[in-house]
Image (tube, rainbow, N blue to C red):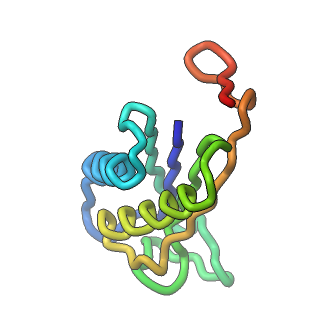
Amino acid sequence: MPLISIKSLPFDNDVDVPGMIKSITEDFARRTDISIEHITVTWEFIPPRHYAVAGLLPATQPQTGSHPVLVNLHAPSFHKQDAISTMLECLAFSVSKRSGVAYSNIFISYQKVMSGNLFDRGKIVTWK
């Protein structure tokens, strides 16, 4: 069920967004042993000058320094801390490698999804 939502400013160069998404999905599945059919990844672009850090509003995605690529990871609450750390590090490495943005310029927020707090495929999903 991991849902990975990625946002960034547009890139200076043309990028293959579908290719990046596919590669990030495959990297995540391989590194976490989560079956690929359970992983969802999206990538959205923030309009130029609609993302401020320290009052700065660039038009394109900086590779280093300010304005990190923003990643939200939603995953079930049954994952232990070491698995969560693996997911976070895997995502940071993969997003950096696939986008060309420095590893240190990736920001990831983990959101724990509790059993019974997920609606998918027409029903409330629970786990033990």
Closer to the camera in the image, 10 or 93:
93
**Does 101 appear above or below 7?**
below
Does any portion of residue 127 appear in the rendered image?
A: yes
Q: Quadrant of residue 95?
A: bottom left
Point 36% across, 55% down: residue: 31
Q: Position of residue 25 (x, y in %)?
A: 36, 47
**Does 23 appear above or below 100?**
above
**Does 116 appear above or below 18?**
above
Point 74% across, 31% down: residue: 117
Q: Residue furthest top?
A: 122
Closer to the camera in the image, 49 or 26:
26
Quadrant housing the C terminus: top right
Q: Quadrant of residue 51?
A: bottom right
Closer to the camera in the image, 61 or 123:
123
Q: Position of residue 14 (x, y in %)?
A: 25, 62
Point 57% across, 64% down: residue: 108
Closer to the camera in the image, 113 or 101:
113
How many marks the image carries: the answer is: 0
Q: Position of residue 97 (x, y in %)?
A: 31, 68
Side of 118 relative to 36 (left or right): right
Q: Position of residue 56 (x, y in %)?
A: 61, 82
Point 56% across, 61% down: residue: 82
Side of 46 relative to 33 (left or right): right
Does any portion of residue 47 appear in the rendered image?
A: no
**Does 112 appear above or below 40?**
below
